[in-house]
Image: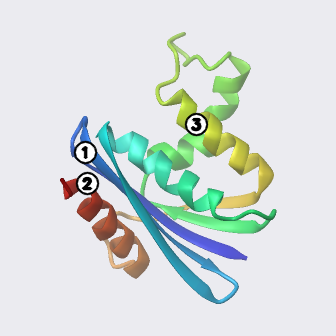
Amino acid sequence: MVVIYTDGSCSGNPGTGGWAAIIFHKSKEKIISGQKKNTTNNQMELLAPIKALEQIKKKEKIKIYTDSKYVKEGITSWIKSWEKNGWKTVNKKPVKNQDLWKRLNDLEKFHNIKWECVKAHSTNLYNNLVDKLARKESLKN
């Protein structure tokens, strides 16, 4: 099983954002991170698991840990309604970050993923590490 920890951060909202992930796969550890200008925290929270999952080319069983309820609830619950309603919210407005949600949804359908929420800024070593890496990316010039 592949285990992934993800986090996103934004300096200003919108502002410069950062994302990070740690991927544990076949007794190897891979750390990835990146930055984007003029973005939001939610976009970075979504981009982190997208970038991590794009690293895994073969269909796998995966457990993803995120501290973003937005990501976990979105991909495990809300997305079904969004798809059914033509990517509109219950208020009939277009889903925000639709492009990212569609990318994540495609990856989610390819793999067998279990999503876990962890408490932000807690004692979870790997969540704290990806948090620090994402914040560092968001503060780069």
Q: Nearer the viewer, residue 91 or 53?
A: 53
Image coordinates of residue 41 in percent, x first then y, are 33, 44
For the residue marked with disc 1, what is the amino acid? Thr
Q: Which mark is residue 16?
A: 1
The residue sitting at 41% across, 41% down in the picture is 43
For the residue marked with disc 2, what is the amino acid? Ser
**Would residue 57 be found to the left or right of residue 95 on screen?**
right
10 Å neighbourhood of mark 1: few (<14), some, or many (≥20)?
A: many
**Mark 1 vs mark 2, CA separation in Å:** 5 Å
**Would residue 19 be found to the left or right of residue 3 on screen?**
left
Quarter the N terminus occupies: bottom right
Q: Image quadrant of residue 125?
A: bottom left
**Residue occupied by mark 3:** 101
The furthest residue to the front: 141
Circle 1/circle 2 CB separation < 8 Å: yes
10 Å neighbourhood of mark 3: few (<14), some, or many (≥20)?
A: many
The residue sitting at 69% across, 67% down in the picture is 62
